[in-house]
Amino acid sequence: MKKLNNKGMTLIELLISFAITSAIVVSMFNVILNYQTEQSTEALKSDIIAYKNTITKLIQADIIKGELKSVDIKPIKQVNNYTEYGFILTFNRNLGSSSLSDPDSLGSGGVLVKELTVRTSNTEENYITYDDINNKGVLQSVKYALPSVGKGIIPAKDNQSTTETNLTKFTAVSTNVNDYTKVDPVTFLNLGINYFDLDITISNNELGGDYHIKIIAPLNYSYCK
Amino acid sequence: MKKVLNNSGFAMVETLIAAVSVISIFALLYNLIYPLLGGYKASQNYDDLDSKYVAFYVKEMIEMDQVDISKQLLNREYNVYQTYAYINDQEGEKRVNIHDIDIDPSGQSEHYYIKNELCELLISEGNMKNNRFFCNKYVAGANVTKIYLLKYETTNFKNIVKDAGGFSRSFKKYVEYMPTHSAAVADKKNNYYRIIVEIEHDSYNTAGNRYYSYASIEVKK
């Protein structure tokens, strides 16, 4: 009968296997750490894309259903800690039964008027509001806050002090409601056909580039379904 | 007789066979999952919601127009319509690449207007129904550089783009991951076509390079 080998492992064998296991664990640690960083960046990107898509759908759905008539740009409001951009969007149509059942939500002439505001700040919350304005001029405000990942400390321009700033924020808001293409007076008549172009830039240094909420839609285009 | 327990463990050959089998299964799974990851990345990079809305408005303008776009695809799988700038100077009208002009809204150096070849096919007229003007101006505002018109069923188009030169890497990538509709579905979709818009975004990444996104949408005529 064959005798069973019950001698077990020697100390050398144990040490070698322990050393190999340690080397593998240490090398995997860096890989996992990199993946963790990548994962948090991807999660942030995903949050920002979801935010951008929510705002875009919200406004574009109104433009398509309500047929955007005109956009008035409000004066930029600059306060110590924030800057606020405001736009009044007037539609040719109301947007269905919910608006009809609430006459207060309709502007003069029975059309829907909405106010869009973008608040940008280095230290305070960055957010967008997009709401009906009723006849009394009262805004029923709903806030869409930009996903926040906290604040970071960066050196001030004088290199003597530091300042705390939002890591993710709106860094630029640009808009165009006129036709900037130069028009040939002979061959290309200007029929007053314009489009609304809004570009809100979202920045975070870790993203490797900016994200944009970009709304571009024709004004007074009567075929929108 | 007492049965002797076999404590000899696995032979090297057995271990190798098991390892190879496990690796094969993982390789198979990787091959199945990798295209999904690629599709996700491609849609994240090239197929964003903004572009989808641009495609939607162009589609609206085509659908509401009286233009017969079926003629554009006679004996063809697809057609490309470029956006050009037209400069009027003392020598008359010149067509130039849109990248060769100063698009600064405040710039007064050039006297130009922008037209897309597909928008130029639109024929409705009148102040409120002039799709050609709407389309040209919208395309200029949205930085649409090209519009592709193709048949509803995309299999042939995908094969052409895959094998042919002359398409950008990003466009090839976008088309590779576009959904393919079966011939049976396409047969039921009479008078349906598809457009792909190419939108240029300048300085979208930190290097300040031009970056293109795409969106496709069906068009019923």
Image (cartoon, grey):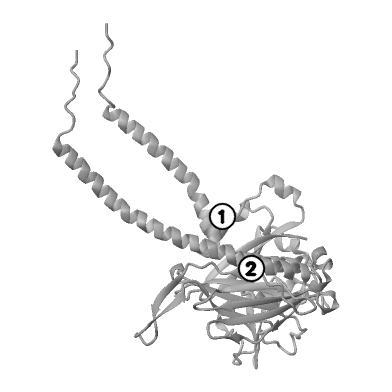
Location of the N terminus of chain B (image quadrant): top left
Q: SS at mark 2?
A: helix
Find disc 1 in the rendering and name its residue. Answer: B177
Q: Is residue B140 visible?
A: no
Q: Nearer the viewer, residue A223 or A95?
A: A95
Give coordinates of residue B143: x percent, y percent. Answer: 61, 75
Find disc 2 in the rendering and name its residue. Answer: A55
- Which mark lies nearer to you, 2 or 1? 2
Give coordinates of residue A38: x percent, y percent. Answer: 42, 60
Location of the C terminus of chain B (image quadrant): bottom right
Q: Is residue B190 above or below residue A55?
A: above
Give coordinates of residue A191: x percent, y percent. Answer: 78, 84
Q: Amino acid at mark 1?
A: Tyr
Q: Assess whether mark 1 and mark 2 are in contact (beta carbons under 8 angstroms).
A: no
Q: Chain of mark 1?
A: B
Q: Residue at x 18, y 24 (%)?
A: A6
Q: Nearer the viewer, residue B81 or A200?
A: A200
Q: Nearer the viewer, residue B153 or A120?
A: A120
Q: Quadrant of residue A97?
A: bottom right
Give coordinates of residue B151: x percent, y percent. Answer: 69, 56
Q: Amino acid at mark 2?
A: Ile
Q: Residue at x 34, y 55 (%)?
A: A31
Determine crowd level at label 1: few under 14, some 14-19, many 20+ residues with C-alpha closer than 10 A: some
